[in-house]
Image (spheres, grey):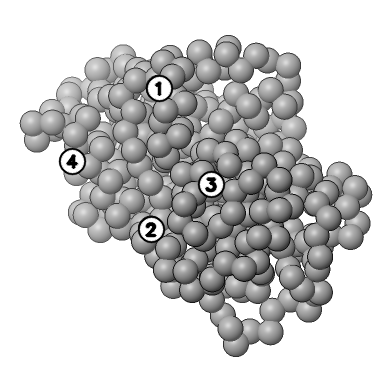
Amino acid sequence: MKRLLIATDAWHPQINGVVRTFEKMVEEVSRHGIDVRMLEPGAFRTMPCPTYPEIRLVIERPKKIRDAIVAAAPDHVHIATEGPLGSIARRWCIRNHHRFTTSFHTKFPEYLRQRVPVPESWTYAWLRRFHNAGNACMVATPSLERDLARRGFRNLMRWTRGVDGDLFRPRPDLPGLDLPRPIFLYVGRVAPEKNIGAFLSLELPGSKVVVGEGPALADLRSAHPEAHFLGFHEGEPLAELYAGADVFVFPSRTDTFGIVLLEALASGVPVAAYPATGPSDVIDGAGVGVLDEDLRSAALAALSISRERCRAFALSYGWEASARQFLDNIRVSCFPTGEEAVDRRLAPE
């Protein structure tokens, strides 16, 4: 495989786990001598997503998108999202008998149900049809794989995530936030599906800090004036905030992995979470966090966990290994004999 096209509706300026994952895949996969191209919203006309304006939805003519795929001349197409770009790329692959893979990142049926009264079974039926058309659907954790298999998803393959251990690291020489200790931290999108209110409603000593932006920010600020909302941070400023916390609280029940878990652990910060998909796969039994339906008990118990142990555990997750697994999944599912036959007679539709 010489040319890889990744179709994703989630890309800059969005900041989330999907974007971060594929940023790293572009970087790492390119080191294997593969020319990686992105089919992403920035190249097309878009409109803001209803109820989530920071997400831009492509409203371009399908022909222009199909022409962009043909111009990329990919040996393989990987579809990262089920939005407009992902759907058009999927149809193009099917019509042209072009092998492709997908990945399942978001429990969209649960998210949608929180906004619109649509039964989860309807949305899962559509997603099942979407992903089962490909040669493989990549998932991040064993529990997600079991859940999707139970729902009729086929050709599931495991694909883990990584962390930048150089950026996210303990910083004992920094003074940290000038707030009462202990500091309980949340980092991520401030959205209803993240269940942040469950964290902010806890009776905890010290300080509760939220880093991030999103559609639920104004409501949470109003409901929890005692909490500290620091807005969006990235890079070094974000890494310093992680390192200055005492416990990372992850209240989501619907995340499929949670890269922020690894970023906190690499910073030497233990995790408190519900025993849900993501945390139950990443940290359960590792001694670097506490999973409990009583999130307050989990947060308090996590205070006694060794920061050195958290750091050592996180460093076992690397982006280079994640990229190798990603490429191996493509080769095994789409090029099992080593041949990479692609119909070069394809023309724009």
Q: Rate crowding at label 3 as few (under 14), some (14 to 19) or many (20 or more) other CA atoms within 10 Å.
A: many
**From the viewer's perspective, is residue 96 above or below residue 23?**
above
Callout in the foreground (4, 3): 3
Q: Earlier in the sequence, mark 3 or mark 1?
A: 1
Quadrant in the rendering for residue 210: bottom right
Residue located beneath label 1 in the image: 149
Callout in the foreground (4, 1): 1
Circles 4, 2 touching at the beta carbon (< 8 Å): no
Residue located beneath label 2 in the image: 317
**From the viewer's perspective, is residue 228 above or below residue 126?**
below
Residue type marked 3? Pro
Q: Which of these two is toward me, 23 or 106?
A: 106
Residue located beneath label 3 in the image: 279
Circles 4, 3 touching at the beta carbon (< 8 Å): no
Q: CA distance from mark 4 to mark 3?
A: 34 Å
**Which quadrant holds the N terminus?**
top left
On screen, residue 310 versus residue 251, left or right, reads: left
Q: CA distance from mark 4 to mark 1?
A: 29 Å
Q: Position of residue 80 (x, y in %)?
A: 43, 35
**From the viewer's perspective, is residue 198 above or below residue 69?**
below
Query: What residue is at 65 percent from the left and 29 percent from the top?
Result: 111
Q: Earlier in the sequence, mark 4 or mark 2?
A: 4
Quadrant in the rendering for residue 207: bottom right
Circles 2, 1 touching at the beta carbon (< 8 Å): no
Q: CA distance from mark 4 to mark 2?
A: 25 Å
Residue located beneath label 4 in the image: 1
Q: Which of these two is toward me, 273 or 23?
A: 273
Residue type marked 4? Met
